[in-house]
Image (tube, helix red, strand yellow):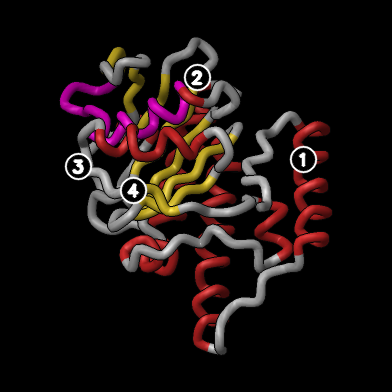
Amino acid sequence: MEYMEIREQICDVCHKMWQLGWVAANDGNVSVKLPDGNFLATPTGISKSFITPDKLVIINDKGEVIAGEPGYKPSSEIKMHLRCYKEREDVGAVVHAHPPTATGYAVAGKSMDEYSMIETVIAIGSIPLTPYGTPSTNEVPEAIAPYLAEHDVLLLKNHGALTVGCDLITAYYRMETLELFAKISLTAHLLGGAKEIEKPQIDKLLDLRENYYKVTGKHPGYKHYN
């Protein structure tokens, strides 16, 4: 994919997130790993509804801007993105947003680390709640690091959500799946609580997920069932 196509794809994802109400004002950030090892990232201080290809910046693995229009720089939360790339060589894109229902779980201090919906088990696995970290500091990268090896989707305590993928569309789809699952889980709670899938069936679903990884090369992103 050419650089311009990647830029347009990032803008498309940003606009979709804003339209869906996952971000407001200057919330959220998106990054994509480039073939040369650098990263294309959304700039700080701009609503995702106003993002255009020329506003994106190219940064190195230290978060330093190496190309972009004067005055534009990445979000201070880029540290979180860079930690994802450092921990996982298979990660090609990172999406951070505040989808309301999923973020409601994060604000309430409740993980979604459960196996109660077939499609979610196969698509994204379990969803842990990571410890609190002060935004823009190294606390957030340190808080998420222990979870990255086995998870593609994280709830950030009192903050929002983070998804990773081999490419941007995969990371975006995982955020979509997370928010839909959060809505379904909340409805299930109002109806008396979600009923987890039985262990033998969970094992079969996880096998499907792992086999999918072997065929596609995409990270399975699941936690082993205990």
Q: Residues within 10 Å of mark 3 (few under 14, many from 20)?
A: few
Residue 28 lies left or right of residue 207; in this view the side is left
Disc 3 to disc 2, C-alpha distance = 23 Å
**Which residue is found at the position 39% from the left and 45% from the top?**
96
Q: Quadrant of residue 1?
A: top right
Disc 4 to disc 2, C-alpha distance = 30 Å
Q: Is residue 161 placed above or below 196 in the rendered structure? A: above
Report the amino acid beneath label 4.
Answer: Pro
Tell which tag, 4 or 2, sits nearer the viewer.
Answer: 4
Among the two numbered marks 2 and 1 on one chain, the one whose residue lies closer to the N terminus: 2
Name the residue beneath numbered marker 1: 210
Name the residue beneath numbered marker 3: 45
Residue 21 visible: no
Among the two numbered marks 4 and 1 on one chain, the one whose residue lies closer to the N terminus: 4
For the record, the magenta segment spans: 68-86
Disc 4 to disc 1, C-alpha distance = 27 Å
Report the amino acid beneath label 3.
Answer: Gly
Name the residue beneath numbered marker 2: 34
